[in-house]
Image (cartoon, rainbow, N blue to C red):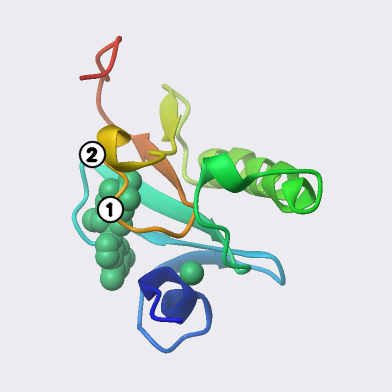
């Protein structure tokens, strides 16, 4: 399968990793939208948030523990935003589930 994030997960494409374990990888976004912009992905190919079900949701719970730990380790004490764009109209450009962790600036609500 020709998936950029599968290739990042298996090391075929280099990335600036900030965390990795047997289930997920976190790495810096190539085109940061905030002073800190990290992506967290499951190593398993899941297309988007629309494909989460009881067969794969354990890794999602794990990823949210990792997100919390990344926020603590990186001093995101003033706040951070977690975003998962799902589908074309939401702006998903890579069809491998990922969570953006953004921090270091203020964020508008509602988002654009
Ligand atoms: P999406 O638009 O699907 O929500 O987010 C995809 C994100 O992946 C974008 O923020 C984009 O900058 C990032 N991205 C795309 N290709 C690469 C890559 O090869 N390496 C890294 N580090 N980030 C990437
Ligand atoms: Zn993939």
The answer to whether residue 89 is left or right of residue 19 is: left
Q: Nearer the viewer, residue 106 or 54?
A: 54
The answer to the question of whether label 1 and label 2 lie on touching residues, with beta carbons closer than 8 A, is no
Q: Horizontal and vertical percent for residue 70?
A: 55, 47
- Residue 86 sits in quarter: top left
Q: Which residue is mark 1?
A: 93
Mark 1 near ligand 1 (CB under 8 Å)?
yes
- Residue 69 sits in quarter: top right
Which residue does the image show at 50% across and 56% down from the upper left? 47
Q: Secondary structure at mark 1?
A: loop
Which residue does the image show at 34% across and 58% down from the upper left? 94
Residue 29 seen? no
Which residue does the image show at 43% across and 23% down from the upper left? 79
Task: Give above or below for 33 relative to 93.
Answer: above
Which residue does the image show at 23% across and 62% down from the upper left? 30
The answer to whether residue 91 is left or right of residue 24 is: left
Q: Horizontal and vertical percent for residue 40?
A: 50, 54
Rendered-image quadrant of the C terminus:
top left
Task: Give above or below for 39 relative to 30.
Answer: above
Task: Give above or below for 20 relative to 97.
Answer: below
Q: Horizontal and vertical percent for residue 55?
A: 80, 52
Q: Which residue is mark 2?
A: 34
């Amino acid at each position: 399968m020709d998936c950029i994030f599968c290739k990042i997960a298996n090391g075929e494409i280099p990335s600036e990793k900030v965390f990795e374990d047997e289930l997920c990888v976190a790495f810096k976004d190539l085109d940061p939208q905030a002073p800190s912009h990290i992506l967290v992905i499951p190593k398993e190919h899941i297309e988007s948030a629309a494909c989460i079900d009881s067969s794969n949701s354990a890794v999602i719970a794990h990823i949210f523990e990792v997100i919390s730990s990344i926020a603590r380790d990186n001093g995101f004490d003033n706040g951070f935003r977690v975003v998962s764009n799902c589908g074309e109209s939401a702006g998903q450009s890579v069809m491998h589930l990922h969570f953006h962790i953004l921090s270091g600036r203020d964020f508008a609500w509602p988002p654009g």
